[in-house]
Amino acid sequence: MKRRDFLRNTVPAGIALPSLVGGFSFKAFGADSPFAQSMFMPVTNTDHIVVIIQLNGGNDGLNMVIPLENFSNYVAARPNIYIPENKVLKLNGITKTGLHPAMTGLQAMFNEGKLNVIHSVGYPQPSFSHFRATDIWMSASDSNNVVNSGWAGRYLNYEYPNFPNGYPNSSMRDPLAIQIGSATSLTLQGPAVSMGMSISNPSTFYNLVNGIQDPAPNTPAGKELTFVRQVSQQTQQYATVIKDAAAKVPTQVTYPTGNSLADQLKIVARLIKGGLQTRVYMVNYGGFDTHSAQVNSTDTTTGSHANLLGNVSNAIKAFQDDLKFLDIEERVIGMTFSEFGRRIKSNASTGTDHGSAAPSFVFGKNVLGGVTGDTPMFGSNVTFNDNLPFQYDFRSVYATILSNWLCVDNKDLQQVMLKNFQTMPLVNAASCKKAVNLSGETLVSNYPNPFTSSTIITFKTNGGHTLIQILDTMGRVITNLTDQTYTAGTYTVTFNAGTIPSGIYYVRLQNMSVQQVRAMIKAGR
């Protein structure tokens, strides 16, 4: 029986530490087993690190990654906020898409092969609530299922089962994950209890520093109180190793000033170079809820959204340069996410409203640089309710990072991710797994198109798990036409449209790492 299967009573936990480095507070997270010292070793032997950047508020992906291939329709949908074509930053070898003019840092990283732009990342039945959508992204749950643990927290529990007894120890003296900032993140919560708590007063702080634990009362809640105090005491011990790690790195590259994301990433680079074995770091940057005044009316390349994107781009570029300067960029990849994108059509307030799918970035020296997916396509007469259909389930991005970067075994990946999500070609084959390259051929189509009551969908699969979905213009999955394992070949399946309204719909193919979306039209009778 496997150690992680044998050891039950899994209880991850964490605590906000006092300001230790650069004025930021930390959350330290850990997990452990109470048995022999060998039982404290992680499941996988890797020194790889992932940095998660949360863009709070719902980032407008269409003005971040501009659809040059569909530019005239983009202009028609956004006459008051579109980025002029001659201002879009070009990407080496790419003609179909470009970056916002404020993102020169990420443009340089793309041209160096250190950035992958993933088009239209989302999930079925998207939520447009900030709170619920954030929970979905952090927990990696279905939108109709509430899960109280985070995807990275479940991964840490997989690696180090049965926290918190015995940690820190000689095998793992450092926190397993560090979040910079004061807010507890669901992403890093384990499957049993919340991992976060705050040090709220000097008495509590000094008790933790001195290893003092007040006796708990002999009441039904006494056991729980003892546990909370134990977690506090153990986690506070991480303060010393964090201080020691930071002290080992006196020199770094220059980061941009007045940029809170850069300030956070500078600390992350410092701690990694300082020798922490911490595997997951999480930072966040807010302000992306741009319902109004997203751009300056006199120059749409400037304004609040441009400032946000410029700060994100400059911070990530400085961080990557620092990793190279510190000789640790081989070990680190990063990713960005936001709880949702924005609508295709802009509003009358020079802004955009809550939408569905949006691009995500994965970056680092060991990332397979390029653009993943097709340029978002939509017509010239979109409405205020129209959304981009998702091409890639965000959980496939997580599954790829876990499998191909953090080296989670395939047979255990589904347990961490709660179900099967296929991996994508995002990470260099020199890491854990060999990535599969996507081809440019058309893999899914339908005939007739337009159609009135039904259409035959033809799809090509390379074998293995294959999913065919129908989505509407709001990004909602209407039906799964097929969801099963196939041998390699070309197949057909019929979509009976029934009584659904006429209009534009999308057929989505997912076959292992390959995912493709095509538009189709249901005509009126």
Image (tube, rainbow, N blue to C red):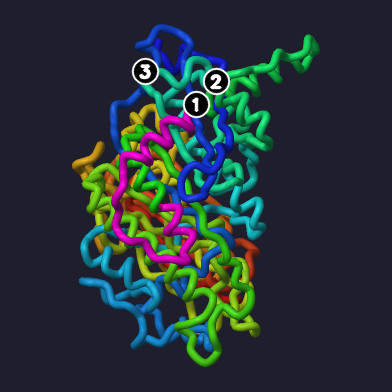
Q: Which residue lies furthest to the right in this view?
A: 219
Amino acid type at image mark 1: Gln
Residue placed most toward the observer, 108 or 257: 257
Q: Residue at the spot x=46%, y=64% of the render?
A: 259
Describe residue 267's horizontal placement relative to residue 495 as left or right. Answer: left
Q: Earlier in the sequence, mark 3 or mark 1?
A: 3
Q: Residue furthest bottom?
A: 298
Residue placed most toward the observer, 356 or 511: 356
Q: How far apart are marks 3 and 1 (CA)?
A: 13 Å
Amino acid type at image mark 3: Ser
Contact (CB < 8 A) between labels 2 and 3?
A: no
Amino acid type at image mark 2: Thr
Q: Which of marks 2 and 3 is nearer the N terminus?
A: 2
Residue placed most toward the observer, 318 or 490: 318
Viewer-side label of 3, 1: 1
- Any part of residue 435 in sight: no
Q: Earlier in the sequence, mark 2 or mark 1?
A: 2
Question: Where are the magenta residues, as a range?
Answer: 238-265
Identify the residue position indicated by label 3 in the image: 170
Residue placed most toward the observer, 250 or 198: 250
Q: Is residue 351 magenta?
A: no
Q: Quadrant of the image for the C terminus?
A: bottom right
x and y percent of residue 163 in the render? Answer: 52, 21
Corner quadrant of residue 524: bottom right
Q: Residue at the spot x=79%, y=13% of the render?
A: 220
Identify the residue position indicated by label 1 in the image: 237
Q: Which mark is residue 10?
A: 2
Contact (CB < 8 A) between labels 2 and 1?
A: no
Q: How far apart are marks 2 and 3 (CA)?
A: 20 Å
Q: Residue at the spot x=32%, y=26% of the render?
A: 44
